[in-house]
Image (tube, coloured by chain):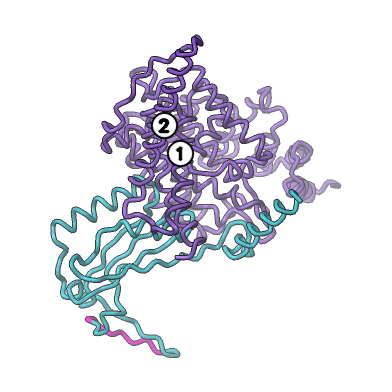
Amino acid sequence: MRFMAIVKADKDSEAGVLPSTELLADMGKFNDELAKAGVLLAAEGLQPSSKGARVRFSGDKRTVIDGPFAETKELIAGFWLLQVKSKEEAIEWIKRSPNPFPGKTSEIEIRQVFEAEDFGPEFTPELRQQEERQREQAAANASR
Amino acid sequence: MTPSDTHRAVEAVWRIESARLIAGLTRIVHDVGIAEDLAQDALVAALEQWPESGVPRNPGAWLMATAKHRAIDQLRRRKLLDRKHAELGYELEVQQTAMPDIDAVIDDNVGDDLLRLVFISCHPVLSTEARVALTLRLLGGLTTEEIARAFLVPEPTMAQRIVRAKRTLAEARVPFEVPRGDEFAARLSSVLQVIYLIFNEGYSATAGEDWVRPALCEDAIRLGRILSQLAPGESEVHGLVALMEIQASRLRARTDQSGEPILLLDQDRGRWDRLLISRGLAALERAENLAASRGPYTLQAAIAACHARARTAAETDWSRIATLYDELADLTPSPVVELNRAVAIAMAFGPTTGLELVDVLTSEPLLQNYYLLPSVRGDFLAKLGRFDEARAEFERAASLTRNARERELLLERARTQAAASGSPA
């Protein structure tokens, strides 16, 4: 399974304040740990929204709006893509990350990536769990 | 957190920490079986205590400390037992094991211990099946049940296989070390073979099967990546990772709606995973920069990369693929490699050349019942307009394959040849 872990922006990241040398070193070490464990697919930082843009879709209309964007809470500052076996594993890994905004309260959001499973479009994670339960039930039945 | 939440968190921590834990413990107790038991004891303790105390800040350290305490307890009990036996006048072979300096285990050794664990799990004294099972258990963190399901054997059979493997290692007194000198290359080769075997088992799993089987691809890639970090100077390790990532990039494109396989050249390349391709190409570059010449895995990765770089089948650089197969044929000659080489050369230089190469292979005993040989020969003959001969080859190929759909496809091609030559089917 793949998960994206998203670092939410704050006013410092939006102001283009670069991470301290210490934070860069700690983040580097954390990314190394992820790589050593074979779970890191990608890790990137995003530049402030002042350098970005939005495309607005309304019917056939396309409007381009230049950054910066006011609602900092809605913005992201960076992400990891992880290859792990469960959401819990993604969580356990991200708990080990240094605080992306040291000294402050910050959040990293974890979201599962959709996969068009190669064993048929039917085999969603929900069905997989269902199969697990059925298997457990069958095993329980067999011992009765 | 609810107890079941904590349970899942413990499982996740186990996946992250178990290999290192077992590796560190093996160095202390000199026995992978005992090390694994100690690690399992620590896991049980975690399952009992963490629902109440919460998941500790450093779960790995908690597990290691718990396991070490158990190790000390066991050694003390054994010494006590030995002393009692001596007192009672029993003659026992008392192992002269000094109490190991358990506190001297420094975390810096983690990487080395993990590499030692990799090599011991793939030791040549074990059969290939045993190596695969042990690797998945000790390094992959899979349960015995999962490994049994992955290889389609009953759980007790797999459990026995693992128990016997550990016993074999103990009886042979296999040292817990990274092989040195000349031995290193051969031993590394067997590690790579085990990882690629796991990958291929996963790759061959078909739609609708137990999900544990296709997941083997992920397990293998993860093991390969871990190894590439433990042994970053080894070209073939990066070569194998490149090969697996590029092959895995095609997983979503290789079967159709009904689960039937689609040939590489017919696949929808829009469904190829570009993230895996770019990672694979980066790994390939690393492999090529690390050695004067490419090893077999790096060569196969380079061939896979040629396909990955072509935006359409028509843009494939066949002459480059042919050159790479020349190199591969020199390194690991085999009739199958020769056949693939012939196909690449024919695609690059035309069917006449391809046919000349393939005609040499028709007397090769190992290919007598290999359906792809007449299939390829038929393809070349068809392209040269020799329809009757092509038809005969496709019919022969159809008779050799056990796959119903494959047979149908080949018979269809035979019929097309018959129509083209105007003779009755």
Instruction: Identify the residue at image location x=53%, y=25%.
Output: B333
- The answer to whether residue B302 of the structure is visible from this angle is no
Magenta: main secondary structure: strand
Judging by the rendered image, the residue that carries numbered circle 2 is: B117
Q: Which residue is mark 1?
A: B139
Magenta extent: A61-68
Which quadrant of the figure has residue B291?
top left
Q: Please name whichever residue, B366 or B222, is drawn nearer the observer in this view of the structure.
A: B222
Residues flagged by tags 1 and 2 on a common chain: yes
Instruction: Label the cyan chain with its letter.
Output: A
The one of B395 and B256 positioned closer to us in this rendering: B256
- Kind of residue sitting beneath label 2: Leu
* Relative to B256, residue B301 above or below: above
Say which chain tag 2 marks: B
The residues tagged by marks 1 and 2 sit, at their Cα atoms, a distance apart of 8 Å
State whether residue B148 appears in this view.
Answer: yes
Q: Name the residue nearer the viewer: A9 or A142.
A: A142
Q: Amino acid at mark 1?
A: Leu
Mark 1–mark 2 contact, CB under 8 Å?
Answer: yes
Neighbours of disc 1 within 10 Å: few (<14), some (14-19), many (20+): many
Residue A64 lies in the magenta stretch = yes
The residue under the point 43% across, 62% down is A3
Badge 2 marks a residue whose secondary structure is: helix
Percent across and percent down for residue B83 are 43, 17
